[in-house]
Amino acid sequence: MAPNDAVQDDRELPPALRRVPVQRWCVGPRTCVQDVTSEEVVEETPVALVYNGISQAVMLATPQDLEDFAIGFSVSERLVACASDIYEIDIVSHLSGIEIQMRIAASAMFRIKQARRMRTGKTGCGLCGIESLEQFSPDPMTVPAGGMLDAGALHTAMAGLCQLQLIHTATGGAHAAGWATWDGRVALAREDVGRHNALDKLIGALSRAGTCPASGFAVITSRASFEMVQKVSRAGISVLAAVSAPTALAVRMADQAGVSLAGFVRANKHVIYSHPHRFKPG
């Protein structure tokens, strides 16, 4: 079974959105409860990533595009060398959460066992799972040198990604990561309550679609942390554009990995933090 042929048991997966009762308040000279109604909120649920029967990580994620998440997480965290190391994906829903059960190559399983670490990821987490500073090793891959991005295309892509944020539009509570061609057309977009998860889902979707990472760039609706830069560099993506700020460590990592990093991409303005040679006026 190929990685994109995921299956699930008889229990249905939880929905990505849930409707909950709410009170709307109006605060002013005469504070009052304006009305009692309901609103949709984004779901987050524990998702366990299981490799050859061994649970490696438990992340809090929005329960959609889980096959993409499994592949993207496995590749970006270097649990597998490439997506083809994943032979099967089964998605099993339980009362307590979801298991993504993967059958992977023996060589990949050996690597996992050597660097064995159980970790629980929380929304927006950074270094979940490592036990000491010695285990922290920011080791991005060096990305290909090619690709030129017109400034107008950069903003076209960010605007296009915003238009594809269906969960965020409904709830205001989800991040998005998008993949755009060099002319700014967003070809793929993924959403999740966690910004890292959204990027992992995008990386997995690129892999499943057979898209060459050097054929475009990534845009994200969040700040750019070191982990985000590390993930795109490991995926071979040469440009990362964020709607918000980067961290200093993210800038250093982007410079080291050859990633062109742009931040504050909004209102027809942006700031380039590393490798500006890929950007041109337009």
Image (cartoon, helix red, strand yellow):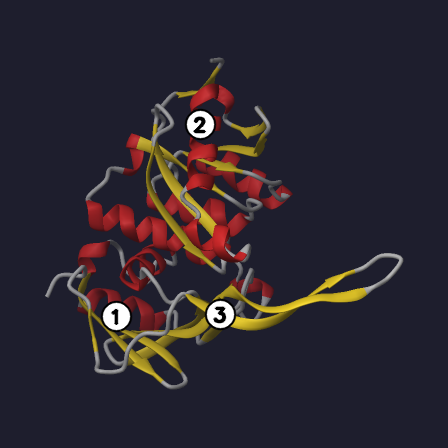
Front residue of this view, candidates 39 and 259: 39
Asked if the residue under mark 2 is in contact with the one under mark 1, i.e. CB atoms within 8 Å, the reply is: no
Report whether 7 appears left or right of 247. Answer: left
Query: Is 140 on the left or on the right of 269, as rendered?
Result: left
Q: CA distance from mark 2 to mark 3?
A: 33 Å
Q: For this view, does 7 lie left or right of residue 41?
A: left
- Counting residues from the N terminus, which is met first, the one under dot 2 or under dot 3? 3
Q: Which numbered circle lies on residue 156? A: 2
In this view, the mark in front (1 or 2):
2
Quarter occupied by residue 52 = bottom left
Name the mark nearer the viewer: 2 or 3. Answer: 3
Q: According to the image, label 1 marks what residue? A: 109
Q: For the residue labelled by badge 2, is the local secondary structure a helix, a strand or a loop?
A: helix
Residue at the location (19% across, 44% down)?
A: 210
Q: For the residues marked 1 and 3, what is the alpha-carbon distance in whole angstroms?
A: 40 Å
Residue 19 — which label? 3
Q: Position of residue 60 (x, y in %)?
A: 47, 69
Q: Residues within 10 Å of mark 2 (few under 14, many from 20)?
A: some
- Disc 1 crowd rating (10 Å Cα; few below 14, some 14-19, many 20+) is some
Task: Give the residue at x 34% y 63%.
Answer: 64
Q: Tell me the quarter of the image containing the N terminus.
A: bottom left
| Residue at 46% from the left image edge and 20% from the top image edge | 152
Query: Which of 14/247 is in front?
Result: 14
Q: Secondary structure at mark 3?
A: strand
Residue 243: x and y, percent?
56, 38
